[in-house]
Image (cartoon, coloured by chain):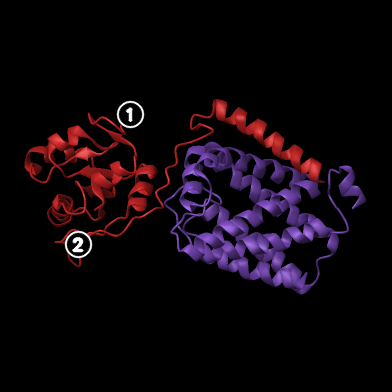
Chain colours: A purple, B red
């Protein structure tokens, strides 16, 4: 918990510094959330049952991230194309499906409905993003992330994206392995977990 | 857990289908995404000098074409342009610049990035046109695609014109 707190704290500050000009709303939300939760974790005051806050934060991020992509599948498809990782015939399919998966899993995670399944999918997505970002970084491709917005004009530091992604994966691990499920709409697996 | 994850994905496919029916920005389920990763070398016209506008590889030119916010200027003669050109490109022949400029300039916003090209690596019109736009007309974002018409056409990328085979119109 403490380690995660430190990670969150650093990533909150890092994110705030690197993305404020590009995406004020998203970066403020993520930075404040990460810093507050991070500080709480560092002090060691956060009990396990408050893991639901992470659910709200990550779920909220996924819902927020999905909206622009759902509205602009044409732009999102271009961003996927620029990553140069996916066979051309699958690009549009992914551009259409992926944002909806983000939206549904985000909502489910917030509501605590089928949260382990939604959490599993979100973790899988984060791992895919990690591979894509790392590969783009290694190949030195100049990409726009396509994380929260479909504009191709905003380019950030790929390393920061990778770091943020890792923090989210660690957090998801905590959610998936949490013993208590608090503030959850239920579903059998959640209650029995 | 896995079963529910699959149900979520199926739900996403259904909703994506619905979204793609009503969304004004809808796209085909299988799109046109050309791949030109093979054999592309950096070409320079013999007159290219340090400080000239930057040059583009075929893949970079293609990325800009797909982006859609760049203006492609065909620096060849009008008759060559009519024969066949990169889809969406505007003809601004270096040799006929004065005749064509007045009508072309209305089509180029000042802050757009311009990509110039001519027939291929050995032609210089794209370079001269790029220099002219930067030095005399105050454009700051100009790039040169030295691969030009020949390389574009060789890879069967989207073109327009009277030219027969490979015409994707």
Q: In this view, does B76 lie to the left or right of B158?
A: left
Judge whether A140 appears above or below B60 on screen: below
Q: Identify the chain of the residue marked 1, using the numbered disc in the image.
A: B
Q: Nearer the viewer, residue B72 or A181?
A: B72
Q: Nearer the viewer, residue A5 or B55?
A: B55
> Which mark's residue is nearer the viewer, 1 or 2?
1
Q: Which quadrant of the rendered structure holds the N terminus of chain A? A: bottom right
* Extreme residue in the right direction: A192
The residue that appears at 19% across and 33% down in the rendered structure is B83
Q: Where is residue A103 in the image (x, y as percent from the top left)?
A: 66, 42
Instruction: Check disc 1 and report the residue beneath it.
Output: B169
Instruction: Check disc 2 and report the residue beneath it.
Output: B52
The residue that appears at 44% across and 37% down in the rendered structure is B32
Q: Which of A147 and B128 is in front in this view?
A: B128
Secondary element type, mark 2: loop
Judge whether A44 appears above or below B5 on screen: below
The residue that appears at 24% across and 44% down in the rendered structure is B149
Q: In this view, does A149 lie to the left or right of B108?
A: right
Q: Position of residue A28 (x, y in %)?
A: 58, 58
Q: Residues within 10 Å of mark 1 (few under 14, many from 20)?
A: few
Q: Tell me whether marks 1 and 2 sit on the same chain.
A: yes
Secondary element type, mark 1: loop
């Amino acid at each position: 918990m403490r380690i995660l707190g430190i990670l969150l704290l650093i990533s909150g500050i890092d994110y705030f510094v690197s993305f404020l000009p590009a995406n004020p709303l998203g970066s403020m939300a993520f930075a404040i959330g990460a810093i507050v939760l991070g500080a709480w974790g560092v002090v060691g005051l956060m009990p396990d049952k408050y893991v639901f806050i992470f659910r709200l934060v990550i779920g909220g991020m996924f819902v927020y991230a999905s909206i622009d992509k759902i509205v602009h599948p044409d732009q999102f498809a271009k961003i996927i194309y620029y990553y140069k990782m996916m066979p051309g015939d699958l690009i549009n399919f992914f551009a259409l499906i992926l944002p909806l998966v983000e939206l549904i899993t985000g909502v489910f995670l917030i509501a605590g409905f089928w949260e382990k399944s939604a959490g599993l999918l979100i973790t899988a997505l984060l791992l895919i993003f990690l591979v894509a970002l790392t590969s783009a970084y290694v190949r030195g491709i100049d990409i726009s992330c396509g994380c929260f917005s479909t504009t191709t004009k905003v380019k950030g530091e790929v390393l920061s994206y990778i770091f943020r992604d890792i923090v989210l994966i660690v957090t998801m691990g905590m959610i998936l392995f949490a013993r208590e499920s608090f503030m959850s709409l239920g579903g059998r697996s959640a209650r029995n977990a | 857990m896995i079963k529910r994850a699959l149900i979520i994905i199926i739900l996403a496919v259904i909703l994506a289908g619905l979204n793609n029916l009503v969304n004004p920005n809808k796209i085909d389920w299988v799109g046109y995404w050309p791949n030109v990763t093979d054999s592309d070398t950096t070409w320079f016209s013999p007159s290219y000098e340090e400080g000239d506008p930057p040059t583009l590889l075929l893949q970079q030119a293609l990325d800009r074409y797909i982006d859609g916010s760049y203006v492609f200027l065909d620096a060849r003669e009008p008759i060559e342009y009519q024969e066949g050109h990169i889809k969406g490109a505007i003809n601004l022949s270096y040799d006929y610049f004065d005749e064509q400029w007045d009508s072309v300039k209305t089509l180029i916003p000042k802050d757009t990035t311009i990509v110039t090209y001519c027939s291929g690596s050995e032609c210089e019109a794209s370079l001269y046109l790029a220099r002219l736009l930067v030095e005399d007309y105050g454009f700051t974002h100009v790039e040169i695609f030295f691969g030009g018409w020949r390389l574009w056409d060789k890879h069967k990328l989207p073109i327009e014109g009277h030219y027969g085979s490979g015409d994707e119109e």
